[in-house]
Amino acid sequence: MTKDIATPIRTRAILEKYGFSFKKSLGQNFLIDTNVLNRIVDHAELKENSGVIEIGPGIGALTEQLAKRAKKVVAFEIDQRLLPILNETLEPYPHVKVIHSDILKADVNHVIEEEFEGFTDLMVVANLPYYVTTPIIMKLLEDQLPLRGIVVMLQKEVADRIAANPGTKEYGSLSIAIQYYTKAETVMTVPRTVFVPQPNVDSAIIRLTKREKPAAEVQNETFFFEVVRASFAQRRKTILNNLTNNLPRGKELKEQIEQALLQADIQPQRRGETLSIEEFARLSDKLNELM
Ligand code: SAM
């Protein structure tokens, strides 16, 4: 039996055979530790009938472990040089399909319709390219894909911001954007030593479980996110100052903004980072009525 792809010896042999050189610009840090890979897959809680979408299979280290536990895996890889390699390394797994595409440009809903017809359980599992973690996660959520959840490895610092609670320095518009759609938890931190080449930041695995409906009900979602972004524009300023300085016509409507804050039961002198998602929802609805 061939060794797992994610052993240092086999990874080196594959890279040498194809004369592969890493592209830093594509966030290419490959995993060479099967224990870590298995932990990622464990956290996805796959069942025999699960479908998995992977982003950035690299030389197939994680893909292989996913293939051992899922019914089907579809992986999006941007780097054409990896396609012949994946063709060889994933040959023993006919239920894996590699799509040569930038995930940010892909019509993932269409791919799901084509590749996962009849599947009742769908997860995204990936060791993400660190230069685009946030845009990828936001795309997966905003595209409203029929997923149970997302389990991904990313920079620890970003994981901390995603899973942060109100009142902490990590809490901000990214925490709210993601927690609006999902329940977010950091399930494991990972040392740099399990990658080649080693990244210059620490990593973490985060699990996002899709909510049946968003964390708060709002009248106007676009405006809700605008209010959230405005509230964090300058973290040291009060919410009243941030809203007046950063909402369209904010200065002109300062009185109405103050009124909306009070009606939403939020002291105007508080800072954005202390507000829960429910409070932001209440506030954006009041502002929507008064502005
Ligand atoms: N899954 C492999 C592993 O764990 O060893 C490789 C992970 S590596 C951190 C990220 C992978 O994402 C690379 O293979 C890279 O070429 C690919 N990638 C980078 N940007 C991408 C994009 N926009 N769309 C799809 N794949 C991308």
Image: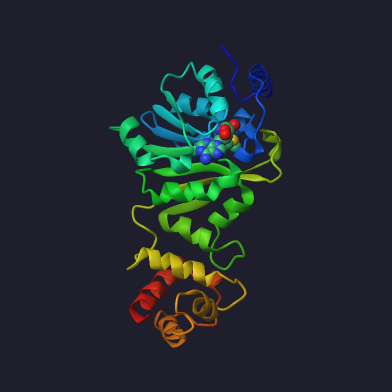
Q: Which of 45 and 194 is in front in this view?
A: 194
Q: In which quarter of the image is ligand 1?
A: top right
Residue 205: percent from left, percent from top: 57, 43
Which residue is rendered at x = 59% and y = 22% of the image?
5
In the visual, does 208 lie left or right of 236? left
Quarter of the image containing the N terminus?
Answer: top right
Q: Compared with residue 137, is residue 94 higher up or lower down, i.e. above or below? A: above
Q: Which of 146 and 82 is in front in this view?
A: 82
| Residue occupying the far left of the picture | 118
Q: Compared with residue 273, is residue 129 higher up or lower down, i.e. above or below? A: above
Q: How many marks?
A: 0
Residue 287 appears in the picture as rendered: yes
Residue 165: percent from left, percent from top: 54, 62
| Residue occupying the far top of the picture | 1
Which residue is rendered at x = 42% and y = 50% of the image?
141
Which residue is rendered at x = 63% and y = 32% of the image?
30
Residue 192: percent from left, percent from top: 69, 39
Which residue is rendered at x = 68% and y = 24% of the image?
8
